[in-house]
Amino acid sequence: MSGSGALPALLQPFFWDHDFARLDWESHRDFIIRRVLQAGSWEALVWLRGELGNSSLRRWIEEQHGGGLSPRQLRFWELLLELPHAEVNRWVDAARNNPWEQRIQR
């Protein structure tokens, strides 16, 4: 990311509940990654992959044990980033057992 760490305006809609002008890449990296992965548009995901690269994004998801992503999102990233299938299965099972996820499985 260049210079100040300020985020591009295309991300602002995904941070409606925060003071967007105060968010910066260096201080809020994990939060920004998680939010973009969970709710970002295709353009936001392209931006994120440009910032991190696929290997760093893969490492982040692995370190976060799925990063709080939904089962559907986990399967997408499993294919795109060649995440280990057995590991993703564990994350998917954990996500499915999350009460928030269970509310939409009925």
Image (spheres, grey):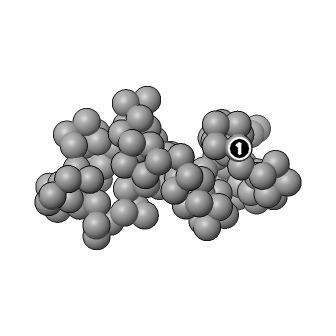
Residue type for callout 1: Glu
- What is the x, y in percent for residue 27? 28, 70
Q: Residue at x 15, y 58 (%)?
A: 3
Residue situated furthest right in the rendering: 86
Front residue of this view, candidates 5 and 99: 5
Q: Which residue is drawn at 20% across and 53% down?
A: 2
- What is the x, y in percent for residue 66? 65, 57
In the rendered image, which residue does mark 1 sit on? 82
Q: Can residue 96 be seen in this view?
A: no
Q: Is residue 46 above or below residue 48?
A: above
- What is the x, y in percent for residue 100? 63, 53
On-image quarter of the C terminus: top right
Q: Residue at x 43, y 38 (%)?
A: 45
Q: Is residue 101 left or right of residue 67?
A: right
For numbered disc 1, what is the local secondary structure? Answer: loop
Q: Can residue 57 be seen in this view?
A: yes
